[in-house]
Image (spheres, helix red, strand yellow):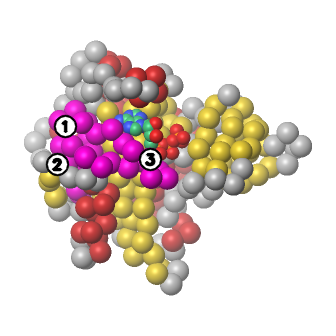
Amino acid sequence: YCGLESVILGRNVYYFDSTASTNQAAREIAAGGGAEGTLVVAEEQTGGRGRMGRGWYAPRYLGIFCSLILRPELPPTEAPPVTMLAAVALARAIQEVCHIKAGIKWPNDILIGGKKLCGILTEMSAEMERLNYLVVGMGVNVNTADFPGELKEIATSLKIETGAFVSRRLLLQRLLYQFEQLYRVWLDKGFKPVLAEWKEYCVTLNCPVRVTSVRETLEGWAEDVDDTGALLLRLPDGTLKQLVAGEVSLRTQ
Ligand code: ATP
């Protein structure tokens, strides 16, 4: 299992012993012309971020903290499903390496047994309706044995779930390979073929949910996800509301 099995993803690699945030490093590299497929990976993040400026716990040597630069020739409005591609890629890689099934929580988390194993943060740079680059960041809890404070209740790792040490190198290798397969399908055929598989892993569909944004909190039935990646929420008054991934948080009830 030496080397990478992907052709585009990981063709350039920036390795950091420690960095504030791989997404931040990748955005700087992308702004300086970093090529499609560039991988930024770090042994630890000292200022890792989730969405909405929340922190991400990224202890040294225990996880995969990485970001990819992508430059698909797509309008910015068609970019959001890339987060879902990353989720399916990781679920596939976990199945291959650990033989366990991960669950996807719309829009950007991977769970096992209801606890968060991975967060995905996609950031986009666009000008005049033209996509410049995407940075897809992933923080995966691999060999973390325990979590500090309130994370104990909500976070898990592959080591905790399987009882065994997991090779980060092998997992990253498979993640990049699977991501690349899905990326090619997305560029050739659109998001629909990937969406079907995404739904098989999703654990937050066909159940009651509460969705919170800065503006409002909505309760309803998570009915479906459409082929733009938006959640279709059936409200108590019977109407169907389309919620775009972004600044919203979802809780199952
Ligand atoms: P929500 O669960 O509300 O949808 P989110 O998906 O937006 O949250 P992010 O903002 O992407 O979550 O991630 C940040 C949150 O994840 C933090 O507020 C913290 O609760 C949790 N968290 C931080 N580090 C870790 C970690 N290593 N593993 C699991 N969860 C973490």
Q: Which of the two residues, 57 or 253, is positioned nearer the viewer here?
A: 57
Return the mark for residue 60: 1
Name the residue rendered at 57%, 32% in the picture: 203
- Residue 162 in percent (x, y) is at 32, 18
Instruction: Tell me the CA gap for discs 1 and 3.
Output: 19 Å
Seen in the picture, residue 107 relative to 191 is either above or below; the reply is: above
Q: Which residues are magenta?
A: 39-65
Instruction: Tell me the CA gap for discs 2 and 1.
Output: 8 Å
Residue for badge 3: 54
Disc 1 vs disc 3: which is toward the camera? Answer: 3
What kind of residue is marked 3? Answer: Arg
What kind of residue is marked 1? Answer: Arg
- Residue 220 in percent (x, y) is at 76, 38
- Residue 53 in percent (x, y) is at 45, 52
Return the mark for residue 18: 2
Q: Say if mark 1 contacts mark 3, CB within 8 Å.
A: no
Instruction: Tell me the CA gap for discs 3 and 2.
Output: 19 Å
